[in-house]
Amino acid sequence: MADARCSRLAGMLEKQSRWRKEWSERFFVMDEDCIKYFISPPAFLDDNGEDVRGKIPLAGLVAEAAQDPGRPYCIRAGRDLLSCKTEAEQQRWLQAINAAGGVEEANQACTKPSRPCAGKGPGLLLVHADRPHQAVALGQPVSVRLASAACATILIQELPVAGGAQALCRLALQKCKSGCSTSFPVELLGKGVCSDEWSLSVQVLGNRLQRTAQPLLLGVASLLSAWMYFVGVDITGLIVALLWQLVSWMQSAAVHEVTFSVEQVQLLKDSADAQAEAPPRWCGTWVLDKSCSEKYETILKDMGVNYLIRKAADAKTSVMIISKSSSHVTFIVKNLVTVEDVLPVDGSWVTKAVPPAGRMRGEMRLRLSKCTENELDVLAVGDFSLGAFVPGKSN
């Protein structure tokens, strides 16, 4: 019974020591059979190593609301006394602990229903895999180092409504230009949570690419490609594969140092509206018709895409998966490599880097010019010439 009703909770609480009656801040993680607590947030919530400071068994545990001088939102859990920062957080932990311990709802009548706390922040943590998580306040600049395929992850410990639910937001910040504002969809955690749709707004303050040995590798790849093209050796397929692996490795080896600030967490659409709206007809999986794609050959050639890479891409089946939320349209293209990107449904401009594999460098602007039930149009604006890519000159 506890397995079906227990939901994962995690967050920073204060714990009073049993003998000295001193308060210390600990990071608590609720599992199916116990509550583990750590001195600092672990890299993984399932950590059972030596970093676990202690455990509170859940079997038969009864949690009650309590108070302590200067700490109005306390929880008496057996012999342990915990302190929460807000009433909503207190009620969330009370309900989860008593549900996991098998306490009937009739015994919880004394607890007050949770409600959003006005004027309180959502409680944000920047998740790190190799060091303790970092607390983030709204408007506070923070810096992260991201590989080309990595995302910065924000743990929202308490949403303003939705019963104080927890959520995760993955920020793909590598392609965001310095000074731009954008938003990312939020994923609610736990079983049985509401299906409200949320977004997290971010202001990008700086984005610097740290290159490694890319110029040298690009030079070697260009010479090898030119030699292969003019000589016409018999190992064309092998060389194409090696060149593509080289380009993919250079993309994955690039590291972006991004400075950003979280501006707000906002509700986009409640569960009733989300259930009433049917997905557009263009959502789903699409396969490129090779018989209609020859006209793109001249465009790729003008962009400086290598001949062999163009032919290798044409020889492989291209698949595009399109999905839509209330705030974004997501595109996933699968060919020689898999590329994922998002565009806001409100039609606002988004600055993107010019895709690699060609001679063009710089940035371009994209937006959804039409997003209806039956039609989806994407508009790209920029100066399509070799060299700098100047937004706003041509379509």
Image (spheres, rainbow, N blue to C red):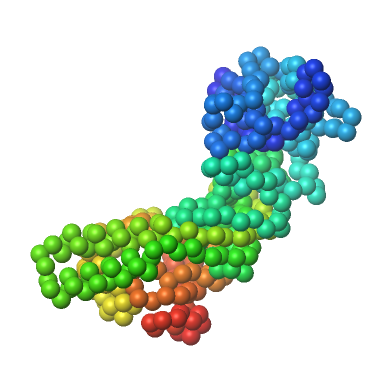
Residue reaching furthest to the right: 69
Residue 291 placement, left or right of 180: left
Q: Residue at x 45, y 57 (%)?
A: 148
Q: Does residue 94 sit above or below 300 in this rendering? A: above
> In the displayed structure, would residue 234 be above or below residue 87?
below
- Viewport quadrant of the C terminus: bottom left
How far across and how far down the image is residue 57, in percent? 64, 18
The furthest residue to the left: 234
Q: Count the numbered circles shown.
A: 0
Which of 34 and 48 lies nearest the eye of the viewer? 48
- Pick the front one: 92 or 218: 218
Tell me the residue at 76%/34% (across/down): 84
Does the image show residue 279?
no
Residue 364 horizontal/vertical position (percent): 47, 75
Where is 169 relative to 256, above or below?
above
Residue under the point 48% across and 85% down: 393
The quadrant in which the N terminus is found is top right
Residue in view at x 55 percent, y 52 percent: 152
- Can see residue 149? yes
Q: Position of residue 53 (x, y in %)?
A: 64, 25
Residue 139 drawn at (x, y percent): 71, 58
Q: Given the current orientation, which residue lies at the most extreme top position?
A: 60
Q: Is residue 284 left or right of residue 185?
A: left
381 shown above or below 48 = below
